[in-house]
Image: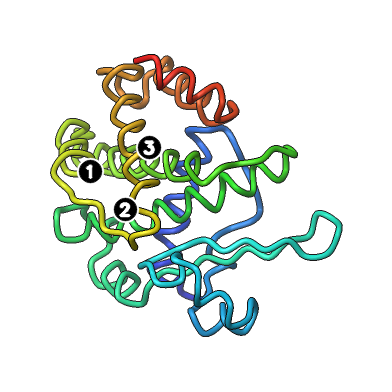
Amino acid sequence: MPEIHPLNQIVHHIEETLGKIYGFTHDISVSNHLVSREQLKTFLGAKVETTPEFHSRAGVFVVQEGQGDDFFIGVHVDEKVQFQLNQDSPLKAVHIENLDSFWVLIEEISHFHLIVNRVFTGKKVSKLELEWQGEIDKLVVSALTLFAQHGDPCIEELQVLLHESSSISAVKELEGLYTDANLFAIRFWRRILKNKHLLDKKAIELLREFYWAPWTYKYSKLSKI
């Protein structure tokens, strides 16, 4: 049996965790849609270099093909991030040195599957919703991974690192978007999910409710608190 690449093992772990929490199963995996910057230029043309996502550490690229439901979707993850994850896998131990790279990968996988799920259900998704969901999923996956490794999800510590201690690293065009997503994520954790354990039935119900709901519903709930 061929050996599974370490990065693909991490991708599978993230996808399996998200699928269990949100109740979706698909044969489509990010592992089959990873592309380099050179491949993006080949598939999408030189114009892709003008997008802010092209110059970020990672990004999901979606292009409609023709008039039907066919579309191109590719996920780029910077080689440095991939190297860090391959050399220091969070599947062995999540710690401060590999957490940032882990979050980068989680966020793009979150974006990928939310886009795919919206396409399959015939619904639209905004950039703000994508970024908000990415913030939620970074904490969900890393917390559940820590819980499996140590019996403690370290929710409060992760919240401080993710939403309060870290600075937003993004190209200028995306700073406002990330700031809003971060604010709404803080409100969700502190005011809606509160101190519930991520594996509690009520917590999973809330996470699923927000995942499948339209952004207008989420925005109304998050704006009132």
Query: Foreground: 213 or 145?
Result: 213
Q: Which amino acid does label 2 sit on?
A: Trp
Marks 1 & 3, CB-CB < 8 Å contact: no
Disc on the earlier residue, 1 or 3: 3
Q: In which quarter of the image is residue 84?
A: bottom left
**Which numbered circle lies on residue 103?**
2
Q: Which amino acid does label 1 sit on?
A: Leu
Residue 81 x %, y %: 31, 69
Q: Residue at x 45, y 58 (%)?
A: 11
Quick one: SS at disc 3? helix
Q: How far apart are marks 1 and 3 (CA)?
A: 10 Å
Quick one: SS at disc 1? helix
Q: Residue at x 48, y 79 (%)?
A: 37
Residue under label 1 = 162
Query: Foreground: 199 or 193?
Result: 193
Residue 197 x %, y %: 30, 22
Q: How far apart are marks 1 and 2 (CA)?
A: 9 Å
Q: How crowded is mark 2: few (under 14 residues within 10 Å), some or many (20 or more)?
A: some
Disc on the earlier residue, 3 or 2: 2
Residue under label 3 = 136
Q: Residues within 10 Å of mark 1 (few under 14, many from 20)?
A: many
Indicate whether 102 appears above or below 202: below
